[in-house]
Image (cartoon, coloured by chain):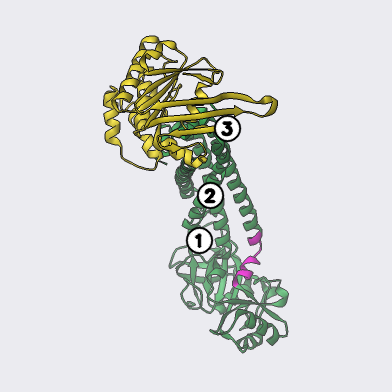
Chain colours: A yellow, B green
Amino acid sequence: MSALDLRDVRKVYGTGQNEVVALDHATFSVGDDEVVVLLGPSGSGKTTLLSIAGGLLTPTEGAVVVGSEDISAYSTKQLTRFRRDKVGFVFQQVNLVPFLTARENLLVVRELGGTRGGADRADTLLAELGLTDRRANLPGALSGGERQRVAIGRALMNEPALVLVDEPTSALDTKLGEQVMQLIVDEVKGRNTAAVIVTHDRRMTSYADRTVEIVDGHLDA
Amino acid sequence: MRIALRELRRRPGRFLIAAGMLTLLVFLLLFLGGLLDGLYNGSTGALRAQQGDLVVLSDDSRDSIIRSRISPEQRVAVEQVPGVDVVRGLGVALVGATIPGQDEAASAAVFGYEGGVDGVPPPPKADEAWVDRRLEADGVRVGQTIELGRSVPGASVPVKVRGFVRDTSYLLQGGVWVQPNTWREVQARNRPDQQLPPGTFQSLLVTVAPGSTVADVQRGITRATDGQLRALTKQATIDAIPGVQSQRSTFQAIIWVTLLVAAVVVALFFALLTLERVALYGVLKALGASSRSLAGGLFTQAATTASLAFVVGAVLAFGLAAILPVGIPLQLLPGRAALTFVGVLVAALAGSAISLRRIIRIDPATAIGGGA
């Protein structure tokens, strides 16, 4: 079974003369424990694809199946629940909650779902990510690499079948970027989880099982 | 909600301006409410304490006890109206009271009564009086003899203070409760033009018998006295006291405007805060937070800020009340404080609700740089 199946997906912004096709009849699959790098320049549509796969955007046409769930026609409420329970995000800007500690930033995923607990999982993830000593620190007291690691832990907190990573190395130097990529791959592979990593940095393709290029909304497997 | 509370705890400075402004508004609301209550209670205590259902006044009195006169014959007619259970006479004379050891005379409302006043024992002996605690601040002490009326020889009536009673003031003058004959004597010596024959009162307090209606008794009294007397409810008589209604409406208007200002302050504050938080809300939505839970957090912060502001504002108001001169009629009551808390809370929630639409419209795709 695929972790992600995009079938003939189109995403169009605007109407008439202002119409912009961000994604054009994209068909794309990611296996259960596969790490795929989606490579493309700025404005190629890779972030749109990632957003559609993660239920942040709905496609104009086509089907989006994550695990066994067809989310193409989900309502806003259904998509909210889907994002909370089924996918993990690592954002380009990291975007940790600034007034929560590293540990709380992991637990926030559970709290948003209205459930408590998860402390053991958070501690395990923090230990794996080498952040045990930094667990009580606010994001402002963490380095860029540490913040990125917390974001990775947060993405894995709800035990997702699919992790979506947006430009994880864009704000990091080459060495730190490589460390972060290795960490993402190790964490994802160690859990038999699938991941789609969006990047414009060709050097990062070496960490993936497969690379898919995207140009002007067209996929080129 | 827990996230919202954590933000409050860890970034208190962020909420300091809103909390500070709300604190000042709470203080103002409590102060205004306290003045309103002090003025109202100080003006109406003697009437509120009456046990009767109806206050009977002469028709030409324009609803004023002071202008009203009721003869013994009219009283008999009232007593015979079907549905009338108990009738008690009441009269008041507003005079100065000379207190031993004090240079200035105190203002007193001397009531001649026949009983039936909450918190006031039955009428004392002819040369005694129950005195409202308000006059304690003017130097009155139990056991003293005070002079009621003008401080010229033969014009005042001496009475011995038998004890204190509470909340029986009239027109912000402390109540002095005496026998009807003592009151008539005070009236005669100080208002020679308004001497009252024995048995005459200014008003009658009527208790309606079980099974009869107030309206029937009111009509019966008017009919039995050929329209010379009219019976008002106690509240109507209170509302007719000079200044009471205008004071109340003025203060209430100020209080409502202050609550509106509180709502606007909170609305502006949370609108700015929401603008600052668009990115954060986008991320939280992307992670699976519903608009409802984000709104819940917003309301939690508004309610907590308002509650803290109330506590600090109340401490300031009660502190000020403790050091204010007795002459300022400020009366801070638990009921008023509770009402103020509810008012500020509702204003804060209503004000913060202005930001709801913006929160609902935040697109989670902004967290990942997508969206239209």
Residue drawn 73% across and 75% down?
B60
- Residue A8 location (% of width, % of height): 53, 28
Residue drawn 49% across and 77% down?
B123
Residue drawn 33% across and 17% down?
A182
Q: Is residue B17 visible?
A: yes
In the structure shown, which secondary structural element does the residue marked by tag 3 occupy? loop
**Type of residue at label 3?**
Thr
Return the mark for residue A60.
3
Give the labeled residue for mark 1.
Answer: B134
Residue B218 is left or right of residue A136, and the answer is right
Locate residue B93: give its quadrant: bottom right
Q: Nearer the viewer, mark 2 or mark 3?
A: 3
Pick the residue in front: A102 or A118: A118
- Residue B90 location (% of width, % of height): 58, 76
Q: Is residue B279 visible?
A: no
**Type of residue at label 2?**
Val
Q: Chain of mark 3?
A: A
**Type of residue at label 1?**
Arg
Return the mark for residue B346.
2
**Are the numbered discs 2 and 3 placed on the same chain, yes or no?**
no
Q: Chain of mark 1?
A: B
Q: Which residues are magenta?
A: B234-245
